[in-house]
Every structure is written in C-alpha cells, then in structure tokens.
Amino acid sequence: MRVLFVCLGNICRSPTAEGVLRARLDAEGMLDRVAVDSCGVGSWHVGAPPDSRAQQAARSRGIELSGLRGRQLDRADFDDFDYLLAMDRDNLTALEGQAPRNCRAHVGLFMAFAGEPQRSVPDPYYEGGFDGVYEMIERATDGLVADLKARLGESP
C-alpha cells in the first residue's frame, strides 16, 4: 500500500501527516508494507524542509521531520499511490481536477478517517496553530491505520 498526503506547499500539514503515519506504522510493525510520502499542489517550497514550527510540534512528541523535503504533486502520483489524501477542500479540488479518468486510488479528505468527512485540516499559519493541527492529524491517522490494517487483512 502507498499513501500520499497533499497540502498546498508541503511544509506544514502534509509532512506532519507523513511523519505521524510513519511513526504509527513503525509502532504497529507495518512500515514494511505501507509506503508514505507527502507533496504540495504548488511548487513554492520544492526542496525545502518542513516549517520549523511543524518540526517542533512533531519533535516534542518524538517524531523527527527535519529530513523531509517539499515536492510538488506529479501526474504519476495517481498511478503510484493507493491513497491521495488532501488536507483541505481546496487541495481536494486540485487533486480531483488533476486525477485521470481511470484513477483507481482513493482520493479524499484526510479527516474522513477521523469520522469527519467534511472537515479540513486548517493551515496552521492562519487557524488551529501547529499543535492543534498535529492533534487533528493524530486522530485521522488512527482511522487511517485501522483502514490500512483492514485492507492488508490484519486484525485491528
């Protein structure tokens, strides 16, 4: 299985989700069966590390994001990933607009895995702050891990 998290610039929300899911998969012994990546719909931060405040929020919880680098969504991602998970509705609209007609990947909002199918993970620059966004990502990650276990035939 392959999971791609998508936000606007790939320096806050999506790399945080990538780091949280990697850590959770490692703890569950699933990291060898699920690949995780993140990207942005825009190119502003290609090659840049995650925002220092996102790194600090993760580091304070034992997760290191400093090795991650921003990249932009690519057409091949729709073929390469099983899940393309948008952080907000604008990112979802961008994904849906770029998805090929024969796209077999699950394309949707990440918070749907927290039982909140219409909720966006807000940009921490403007709403929610980095700690609040981190907590939302943790909740959705719990549901995503359960979904991945079911798809891989593992018990919850």
Image (cartoon, rainbow, N blue to C red):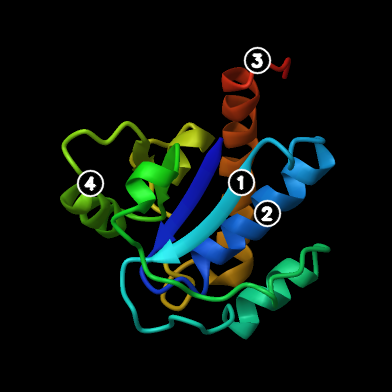
Image coordinates for residue 73, horizontal then vertical, percent: 35, 63
Tell me where residue 63 sits by quadrant. Answer: bottom right
Q: Nearer the viewer, residue 153 or 56?
A: 153
Q: Which residue corresponds to mark 3?
A: 153
- Tag 1: amino acid: Ala
Q: Nearer the viewer, mark 1 or mark 2?
A: 1
Q: Which residue corresponds to mark 1?
A: 35
- Tag 3: amino acid: Gly
The residue at 82%/36% (across/down) is 29
Lower sequence index among marks 3 and 2: 2
Q: Are marks 3 and 2 in contact (CB under 8 Å)?
A: no
Q: Which residue corresponds to mark 4?
A: 99
The residue at 49%/75% (across/down) is 70
Q: Which residue corresponds to mark 2?
A: 20
Q: Cα distance, mark 1 to mark 3?
A: 17 Å
Quadrant of the rendering where the N terminus is positioned: top right
Q: Cα distance, mark 3 to mark 2?
A: 22 Å
In this rendering, position of residue 132 left or right of residue 61? left
The residue at 56%/76% (across/down) is 69
